[in-house]
Amino acid sequence: MVGSGVGARAGAETGHGGVEAGVVSGAAAAAGTAGAIAPEADVAHHGHVSLHGGRFEISLTSENHGPSGLDDVTVKLEFSLRPVGELRLPERCLRAGERVVLCATGPLRADGAGRTTTLRLRTAGDPPEMVVNIRTVWNGGATDRNPANNEHRVIVPATGDPYAF
């Protein structure tokens, strides 16, 4: 039996006295086996942001300090200024609102090499500063006991200098 949505069951009577294995999607699939312990992983985002002449660039490296590896992580980048013009986002990134971009990192091995994402965008006019909020919004259900290194608020004056986070 293949089920999806609310009410799908992990198994169903086959009518022959046996139980047939099933596939479950939604919340039940995310929860995994009853009583299973969620993996633990320490996701960290570091990089820099610069702003000058109405152009801004963010270079973000996402890492996993372990102990468990992760299949994927989604990071949310929220800007105080709305990007304008043609948005050429990197593969694995999408616009999720006027001032929001979501990017998937791909697999992050425990204590492995990080994955870097770079965005180059424009703002309207020549603003004196902007603010960028960065945070993990999905990590596959892993427990992260150190969320401070994956949530950042960066104030970026329009100097052209890279401001680290």
Image (tube, rainbow, N blue to C red):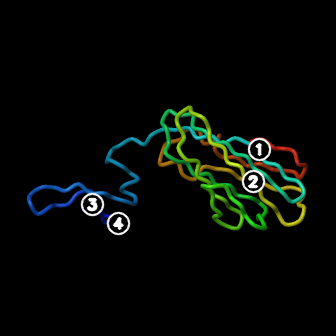
Q: Which residue is mark 3?
A: 9
Q: Estimate how packed mark 3 is, as few (under 14), some (14 to 19) or many (20 or more) residues with alpha carbons within 10 Å.
A: some
Q: Which residue is the extreme one toward the left?
A: 16
Q: Which residue is mark 1?
A: 48
Going by the numbered disc 2, the residue's amino acid type is: Val
Going by the numbered disc 4, the residue's amino acid type is: Val
Residue 6 locus on image (x, y percent): 35, 66
Position of the N terminus by quadrant: bottom left
Q: Which sits in the foreground, 45 or 131?
A: 45
Q: Which residue is mark 4?
A: 6
Q: Which sits in the foreground, 153 or 81?
A: 81
Q: CA distance from mark 4 to mark 3?
A: 9 Å
Mark closest to the chain's N terminus, 2 or 4: 4
Q: CA distance from mark 3 to mark 1?
A: 46 Å
Q: Secondary structure at mark 4?
A: loop
Q: Nearer the viewer, mark 4 or mark 1?
A: 1
Q: Which residue is mark 2?
A: 132
Residue 81 locus on image (x, y percent): 79, 62
Q: CA distance from mark 4 to mark 1?
A: 42 Å
Going by the numbered disc 3, the residue's amino acid type is: Arg
